[in-house]
């Protein structure tokens, strides 16, 4: 698959905002799983670790791949719990964009704020998803205000909810042929976009859907603004629209498949080594060079990781996220490259001295 058709994304959320439910519904909507799990009965696909289930938090970052609208979406699970900030940082490094999930009642919470700041540091473009709009007290406007005030970003409200709280029935897209009743909300969106984007400013008053969409894409990818979507993962509302927005607004990976291979080990789990390929192509049977440890590693199998099965593939190209078998000693954080062009992406971690002398 061409890199332009890949989206490597993470779902960032405060514990309990609905990340697990949303991931489940995404996997269902994309046909990756045929039965949705239910977090409340503890049989979801992504939270498969028993310890994780018991504690109700996502500890391990796993990657899951699914297809939507001719694109491959690789979901990299980012831990929502602040104790695992090392893992959060590493997972942010391997993704190109993220969906930040907020609770429609609580809005921005302290923990979502800290993950947001980390994502800022890594320059990860984001979409916001205001979840749980079916809950009593949920209010999109209040949540949007908290995103603007506490996260210091320009939110672009690209959807409006239909019905409130218990009567919440779905979402209407404001970019793609909104109904006449949404004219006012569309006008506000156009104005917000025109303030930031010259092409949109030129068409203010008579803006085409495509100009608006292109401008939102530019602003999102540049990190200048954050499209705000909404819904209820639990009620399966707004999930397909979110998938469209991921494809439309979040960036494809950069990287050159013709160069020598460079890939980062970002996770090791159950004898699988998870890789993000940055450049080049890794083919089954290749021997790669771990310049950090000075060892070679053999890539025996390459797997595309799906929710309920892994599929063998022959190669992984720049931009891909895959799991491989074969590497024996490579650690999380190791870079695979070639002896001809050795690369180390992450400085090896050095333990902090216990006592420092001033
Ligand atoms: P996580 O901790 O972010 O992974 O959140 P979960 O997906 O485990 O959800 C936390 C709780 O919120 C669970 O009890 C879910 O059933 C519930 N939940 C998730 N999405 C929604 C929603 O859209 N509406 C409502 N009312 N509850 C939801």
Image (spheres, rainbow, N blue to C red):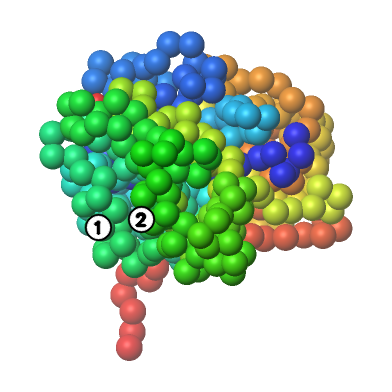
| Residue 205 against residue 54 in the figure, above or below | below
**Residue located 38% across and 42% down the image:** 182
Q: Residues within 10 Å of mark 1 (few under 14, many from 20)?
A: some
Tell which of 153 and 91 is nearer to you. Answer: 153
What residue is pinned by disc 1?
Answer: 146
* Residue 227 appears in the picture as rendered: yes
**Residue located 64% across and 33% down the image:** 72
What residue is pinned by disc 2?
Answer: 115
Q: Position of residue 70 (x, y in %)?
A: 68, 30
Using residue 24 as the reference point, say whether residue 345 is left or right of it. right
**Residue located 55% across and 56% down the image:** 206
- Name, please, the residue furthest toward the left: 136
Task: Say which element carries label 2.
Answer: helix
Q: Nearer the viewer, mark 1 or mark 2?
A: 1
Tell which of 343 and 205 is nearer to you. Answer: 205
Which image quarter has ligand 1? top left
| Residue 143 against residue 200 in the figure, above or below | above
| Residue 57 against residue 98 in the figure, above or below | above
């Amino acid at each position: 698959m061409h890199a332009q058709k890949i989206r490597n994304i993470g779902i960032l959320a405060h514990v309990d905002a609905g990340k697990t439910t949303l991931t489940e519904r995404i996997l269902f909507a994309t046909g990756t799983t045929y039965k949705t799990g239910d977090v409340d009965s503890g049989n979801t696909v992504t939270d498969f670790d028993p310890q994780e289930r018991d504690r109700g938090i996502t500890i391990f970052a796993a990657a899951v791949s699914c297809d939507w609208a001719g694109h491959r979406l690789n979901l990299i699970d980012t831990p929502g719990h602040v104790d695992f900030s090392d893992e959060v940082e590493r997972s942010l490094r391997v993704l190109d964009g993220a969906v930040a999930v907020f609770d429609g009642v609580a809005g921005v919470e302290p923990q979502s704020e800290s993950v947001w700041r980390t994502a800022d540091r890594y320059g990860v473009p984001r979409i916001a998803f205001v979840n749980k709009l079916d809950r009593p007290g949920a209010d999109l406007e209040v949540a949007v205000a908290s995103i603007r005030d506490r996260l210091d970003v320009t939110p672009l409200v690209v959807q409006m909810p239909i019905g409130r709280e218990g009567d919440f029935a779905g979402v209407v897209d404001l970019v793609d042929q909104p109904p006449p009743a949404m004219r006012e909300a569309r006008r506000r969106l156009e104005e917000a976009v025109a303030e930031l984007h010259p092409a949109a400013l030129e068409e203010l008053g008579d803006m085409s859907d495509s100009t608006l969409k292109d401008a939102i894409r530019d602003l999102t990818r540049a990190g200048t603004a954050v499209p705000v979507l909404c819904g209820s993962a639990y009620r399966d509302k707004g999930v397909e629209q979110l998938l469209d927005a991921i494809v439309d607004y979040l960036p494809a990976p950069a990287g050159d498949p013709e160069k020598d291979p460079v890939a980062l080990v970002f996770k090791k789990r159950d004898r699988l080594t998870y890789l993000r390929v940055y450049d080049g192509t890794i083919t089954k049977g290749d021997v790669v060079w771990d310049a950090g440890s000075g060892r070679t590693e053999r890539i025996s199998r390459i797997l595309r990781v799906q929710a309920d099965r892994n599929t063998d593939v022959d190669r992984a190209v720049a931009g891909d996220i895959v799991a491989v078998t074969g590497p024996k000693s490579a650690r999380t954080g190791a870079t695979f490259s070639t002896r001809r062009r050795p690369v180390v992406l992450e400085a090896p971690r050095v333990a902090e001295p216990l006592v420092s002398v001033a």
